[in-house]
Amino acid sequence: MWTQLLVIVGYYGLAAPRLCLAFREEPSLVETEVGANPVQIEVGEFDEAIEIVEDVVAENPCLNHHCKKGKVCEVDESNTPMCVCQDPSTCPTAEVVFDHVCGTDNKTYDSSCHFFATKCTLEGTKKGHKLHLDYVGPCKYIEPCMDSELKEFPLRMRDWLKNVLVALYEHDKDHNLLTEKQKLRVKKIYENEKRLHVGHHSLDLLAHDFEKNYNMYIFPVHWQFGQLDQHPVDGYLTHTELSPLRAPLIPMEHCTTRFFEQCDSDNDKYIALEEWASCFGIKERKCRHQNYC
């Protein structure tokens, strides 16, 4: 098991959040690696859209028949595997408060397992179509995001993404958290003497550093988009693809929802790479979505 980087964002009033980077041994929760990304919770926790069926003959047909979240495999009378909605009562009991999740129906579910099992039973209904996992933890009052606060959000987010990549580079000796190409890109940032190091910086300083060292922020912003754009890799983020980053941030950063809604400038329910970059103040540039500049 490789050491997973945990990034915890603390939110204190209207001040910039304090960032705590720590390491601990933790088993992986997903079978398919989607890119080692410390910024987001494992994609498997929020995966609503993937159902993979492999044509592999086995004694138990369900051994190689994979169902999406909220469903389990059963065999019919002809021993053919099929995915059916999971009974929420079969989900493991939550052990800690952050096992709970809040749905867009403002209801607290015991765990993501309970949420997706419930959502499965609503398939084909208007309620089920609108129901999504909103954020990690019990439902609570999320204070409104003021216009002035919304302008500050990308300042902190850009700096956070840059620091996460640098931390990955520093600790990526044997874990293959970054590809060789990514390491070369981050190495330039890491070795730059002008780099603003981790700290409790004022918003004015963050804005000044972005203007002065603009090129240092381009790759971290595009890298995060690439970590989220997985199913499929098409240069667009769906609600489900965005959830691994969005869900853990909302309870600590009350402008998260409004920020990502604003990113979808054409209101088509997808965030294109160009829209994502624009949200973070990155100028439009031509690049292939497979490489994300």
Image (spheres, rainbow, N blue to C red):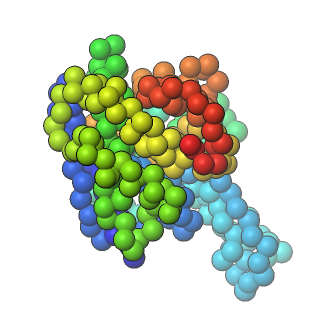
Residue furthest to the top in view is 147
The residue lying furthest to the bottom in this view is: 59
Number of numbered tags placed on the structure image: 0
Residue placed farthest to the right in the image?
Answer: 78
User: Does the rendering let one see residue 66?
Assistant: yes
Relative to 272, does residue 7 appear above or below in the rendering? below
On the rendered structure, is 217 left or right of 131?
Answer: left
Residue shown at 78% from the left, 81% from the top: 57
Residue 201, position as x, y percentages in the image: 18, 33
- In front of the other: 289 or 194: 194
Tell me residue 246's x, y (percent): 43, 39
Residue at screen point 64% across, 48% down: 290
Above or below, 85 relative to 218: below
Work out which quarter of the rendered image holds the C terminus and state it: top right
Residue 114 visible in the picture = no
Identify the residue at horizontal 51%, vertical 26% (top origin): 283
Residue 50, quarter of picture: bottom right
Residue sitting nearer the eye, 89 or 265: 265
The x, y position of residue 72, in whole percent, is 62, 63
Where is residue 178? Give x, y as percent: 46, 61
Foreground of the two, 112 or 213: 213
Left or right: 44 with respect to 98? Answer: right
Which quadrant of the figure contains the N terminus?
bottom left
Q: Residue furthest front?
A: 193
Say which of 261 and 103 sits in front.
Answer: 261
